[in-house]
Image: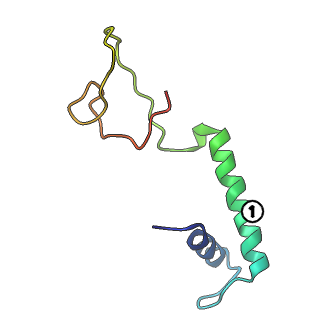
């Protein structure tokens, strides 16, 4: 599983802040973590920035519950979570 440290290390390499085989300083890593947290917070506040948010609708039949997943009322891959 990718960690925040992995994301930060790769981002600093792509940005040219560190070279191949080099390690970022603690200060650079702390600054990068701050910016990563800011970015994730922005994605949380502005959900439209997240490209894979799927909005799906189904005509209500008055049933007590509806199923989500392959072959269910919402016939789609099972999502990681439901917003509403």
Q: Residue at x 70, y 66 (%)?
A: 33
Q: Quadrant of residue 48?
A: top right
Q: Secondary structure at mark 1?
A: helix
Rendered view: 83 above or below 15: above
Rendered view: 34 above or below 78: below
Please identify the residue farthest to the bottom as the structure is shown. Answer: 21
Q: Is residue 39 left or right of residue 73?
A: right
The image position of residue 38, as x and y in percent, is: 72, 54
Q: Residue at x 27, y 24 (%)?
A: 73
Q: Nearer the viewer, residue 68 or 13?
A: 68
Rendered view: 28 above or below 52: below
Q: Nearer the viewer, residue 62 or 39?
A: 62
Q: Residue at x 45, y 30 (%)?
A: 55
Q: Quadrant of residue 18?
A: bottom right
Q: Quadrant of residue 75?
A: top left
Q: Residue at x 32, y 22 (%)?
A: 66
The image position of residue 43, as x and y in percent, is: 63, 46
Q: Nearer the viewer, residue 63 or 4?
A: 63
The image position of residue 39, as x and y in percent, is: 68, 54
Q: Which residue is mark 1?
A: 34
Please identify the residue farthest to the left as the structure is shown. Answer: 71
Q: What colour scheme has been applied to the protein in the rendered image?
A: rainbow
Image quadrant in which the N terminus is located: bottom left
């Amino acid at each position: 599983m990718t960690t925040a440290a992995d994301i930060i290390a790769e981002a600093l390499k792509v940005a040219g802040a560190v070279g191949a085989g080099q390690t970022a300083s603690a200060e650079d890593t702390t600054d990068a973590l701050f910016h990563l947290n800011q970015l994730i917070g922005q994605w949380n506040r502005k959900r439209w920035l997240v490209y894979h948010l799927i909005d799906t609708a189904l005509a209500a039949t008055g049933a007590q519950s509806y199923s989500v997943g392959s072959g269910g009322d919402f016939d789609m891959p099972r999502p990681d979570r439901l917003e509403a």
